[in-house]
Amino acid sequence: MTDTILSVKDLQIDFKTFAGPVHAIRDVSFDLKRGETLAIVGESGSGKSVTVRSIMGLLANNSKIVTGEIMYNGADILKKTKRQLNAMRGNDVAMIFQDPMTSLDPTMPIGKQVAEPLLLHTKISKKKALAEAVRVLKLVGIQDAEERLKDYPHQFSGGQRQRIVIAIAIINHPQILLADEPTTALDVTIQAQIIHLLKEIQQKIDTSIIFITHDLGVVAGIADRVAVMYAGKIIEYGTVDEIFYNAQHPYTWGLLEAMPTLETDTDRLYAIPGTPPDLLDPPKGDAFAPRNPFAMQIDLEQQPPFFQVSPTHAAATWLLYPGAPKVELPPEIKRRREIWNSKYATKEA
């Protein structure tokens, strides 16, 4: 898995408001490899969904792409015409949205909705498209699919509706599947089923996935690599193990501390203090500095560059600067670091 199917470079997106431009996405860059799952995590408002919607060309009318490029199969998506984007959406690149009830048409039987992408992008007959819809509905775990083709979305449970949305997204075997918090509205048991389903489908149709979530617990079960976003910027990226057990950015530490584990022995979960910055006027230094108990003076004055931790792991924090002081790690992060050291130090020895 070495070849890149999607490359986002120096992406900047503003939103026009009455108060002025909101700098929602600020110099975001990342690659997606063929066959891998990249998770983008962060609090609400960090820019995750806007980043993914820009790949589909589904930004709001008041948005403006200031700079950047999104290269897919050698072509810049941002330079495609409306007609070219329509040909790409649902065919080469497909999206699973967060709420299946707003994704599905309540007035149309689900059989027609699942078959629609095939009818739009291929010359297949309606009869064959419906037969393929049955096959794909069975693939995503809808029982008695033939009998339920004429049923409407309200006749299915929440988990079943999300499976139908996934069926619509995968029926054309897209090369890239964008999943925008697809399990947020579901209970924990159904979440686990949907994640398992996505991994199975990925192997069967050989697709790459970008998975958006604010829940690091979900990431562990699906992702190969993780990019952490804060205030419109990616501030750390690495493999799942590197992010979970050797995180370097204090914001990532906060996300990990806020995630309940079997070792959690308190009645109250940790919450990162403070609120994200106002992106009408982004701070000139590290945007996380006001909420960062380890912030130094330089954090308020200059944005940190990425410091390479390993060939696959980097973080934008001044704590990685060679002359930076050593800090006392939070207990949960220290515990994870000990697991990392015991697991990988022996390999390197």
Image: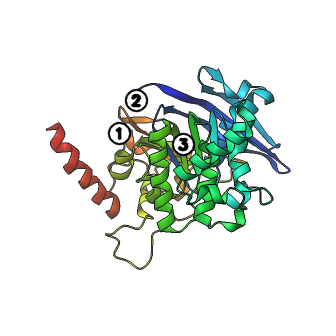
Residue in the foreground of this view, choosing between 66 and 151: 151
Q: Secondary structure at mark 3?
A: strand
Q: Secondary structure at mark 1?
A: loop
The label number, if any, that marks residue 265 in the structure image: none
In this rendering, the label closer to the viewer, 1 or 2: 2
Which residue, given by chain and number where applicable, does mark 1 sit on?
Answer: 323
In this rendering, the label closer to the viewer, 3 or 1: 3
The label number, if any, that marks residue 1 in the structure image: 2
Q: CA distance from mark 3 to mark 1?
A: 36 Å
Q: Give, as a three-letter code, the residue at label 3.
A: Ile
Please tell me whether residue 239 is drawn above or below residue 327 in the rendered image. above
Q: CA distance from mark 1 to mark 2?
A: 36 Å
Which residue, given by chain and number where applicable, does mark 3 sit on?
Answer: 210
Q: Which badge, 1 or 2, is on the more N-terminal residue?
A: 2
Q: Identify the residue at image location x=57%, y=46%.
A: 135
Quarter occupied by the N terminus: top left
